[in-house]
Image (spheres, rainbow, N blue to C red):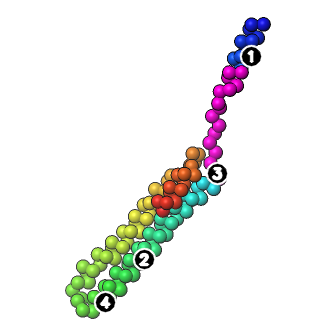
Amino acid sequence: MAAATTALATSAVTALVPVELPHREPLYAPFFGIMGSVSAMALCALGAAYGTAKAGSGIAAMAVMRPQLIMKSLIPVVMAGIIAIYGLVVSVLISSALGGHGYRLYTSFLHMGAG
């Protein structure tokens, strides 16, 4: 009788131990990370295009009055193009973290904010 009582008590104690359930993230979690990657690339490319257009119009206006300064005025065009390269780097960094198990919704929101 005593053995049955201790077996029953032991099984009752183990039944009350909390079990770690696998943490399930929603299926739409990677969507926000992908949107961050896309927005990083697209918005940086748009900014670089706008900067190149403004610098190009400045070069065209300056070339009429001072043609000797055309080569110096190419620096803003190059600097505007570097912005697109930074956007590409951020997009690749975000894309490398996408996928796989353990990609959390919180992380995807951070990636969307970074983009």
What residue would you read off at disc 1?
Answer: 8
- The amino acid sitting under disc 1 is Leu
Q: Secondary structure at mark 4?
A: helix
Q: Is residue 97 above or below residue 87?
A: above
Q: CA distance from mark 1 to mark 4?
A: 92 Å
For badge 2, the amino acid type reads Ala
The residue shown at (54%, 55%) is 108
Front label number (2 vs 3)? 3
Q: Give the camera-side residue of 36 and 76.
A: 36
Q: Are marks 2 and 4 in contact (CB under 8 Å)?
A: no
Nearer the observer: mark 1 or 2; the answer is 1
Identify the image quadrant of residue 29: bottom right
Where is residue 59, by image quadrant? Answer: bottom left
Provide residue 28's location: percent of width, then percent of height. 63, 56
Q: Secondary structure at mark 1?
A: helix
Query: What distance separates the C-alpha of mark 3 from that of mark 1?
Result: 39 Å
- Mark positioned earlier in the residue sequence (2 or 4): 2
Judged left or right of residue 54, residue 72 is left
Q: Main secondary structure of the magenta part?
A: loop
Specify whether residue 65 is in view.
yes
- Identify the residue shown where x is 71% and y is 16%: 9
Neighbor class of circle 4 (other Cα within 10 Å; few <14, some 14-19, many 20+) is few
- Residue that carries the numbered disc 3 in the rendered image: 26
Q: Which mark is residue 49?
A: 2
Residue named by callout 4: 61
Residue located farthest toward the top when viewing the structure as drawn: 1
SS of the residue at dot 3? loop
